[in-house]
Image (cartoon, grey):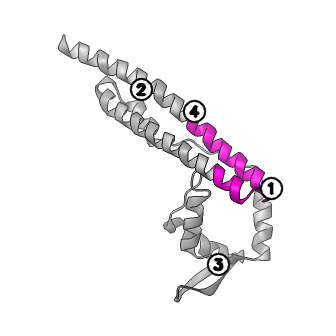
């Protein structure tokens, strides 16, 4: 695949839990090529010349080694939660809007997950990796349902805080 193809494929498959920019993909391709894990070859698409990459045997071995290692813990970094934490009752309206937006996004994401699940079951039913894909998808579904529940709980709290703030201002 080309770097563009890799970005496009990642967005439609692993993009719900792993995202990369072109600024990350192209330097990584250079590093992988320098290590001998991939090779670049010319390719054509709609008459255009482009560079495509393919994994080498050495790259397949390196991938196998990496897959055998346990995953490293990922530190949580959420600008959303940081801003919410640093807010106070005077920011309740703005924070409520943020949470409403997150609720809408996660609700839409759940709809997208249902379409992905339906597509996988229709098009990939016999693929040997299907149980792994479905388990990954299930994680996303569980996470989104938890965020939807959290948003609903938080909206009640924020609306109460906003109402309390309004009462205090009017006194």
- Residue picked out by circle 3: 53
C-beta proximity under 8 Å, tags 1 and 3: no
Range shown magenta: 117-145
Q: Earlier in the sequence, mark 3 or mark 4?
A: 3
C-beta proximity under 8 Å, tags 3 and 4: no
- Residue picked out by circle 4: 146
- Residue picked out by circle 1: 68
* Label 2 – label 1 distance at C-alpha: 42 Å
Element at badge 1? Answer: helix
* Label 4 – label 2 distance at C-alpha: 14 Å
Q: Earlier in the sequence, mark 2 or mark 1?
A: 1
Tell which of 94 and 58 is nearer to you: 94
Residue 5 spot, x, y in % from top left: 57, 72
Q: Residues within 10 Å of mark 4 (few under 14, many from 20)?
A: few
Quadrant of residue 146 in the image?
top right
Q: Nearer the viewer, mark 2 or mark 1?
A: 2
* Label 1 – label 3 distance at C-alpha: 24 Å
């Amino acid at each position: 695949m080309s770097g563009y193809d890799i970005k496009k494929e990642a967005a439609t498959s692993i993009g719900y839990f792993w995202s990369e920019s072109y600024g990350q993909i192209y330097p990584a391709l250079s590093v992988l090529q320098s290590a001998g894990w991939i090779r670049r070859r010319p390719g054509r698409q709609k008459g255009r010349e482009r560079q495509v990459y393919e994994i080498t045997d050495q790259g397949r071995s390196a991938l196998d080694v990496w897959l055998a290692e346990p995953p490293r813990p990922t530190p949580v970094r959420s600008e959303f939660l940081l801003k919410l934490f640093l807010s106070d009752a005077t920011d309740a309206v703005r924070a409520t809007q943020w949470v409403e937006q997150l609720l809408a996004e996660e609700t839409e994401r759940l709809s997208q997950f249902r379409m992905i699940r339906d597509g996988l079951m229709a098009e990939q039913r016999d693929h040997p990796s299907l149980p792994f894909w479905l388990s990954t998808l299930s994680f996303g579904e569980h996470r989104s349902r938890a965020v939807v529940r959290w948003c609903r709980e938080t909206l009640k709290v924020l609306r109460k805080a906003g109402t309390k703030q309004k009462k205090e201002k009017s006194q």
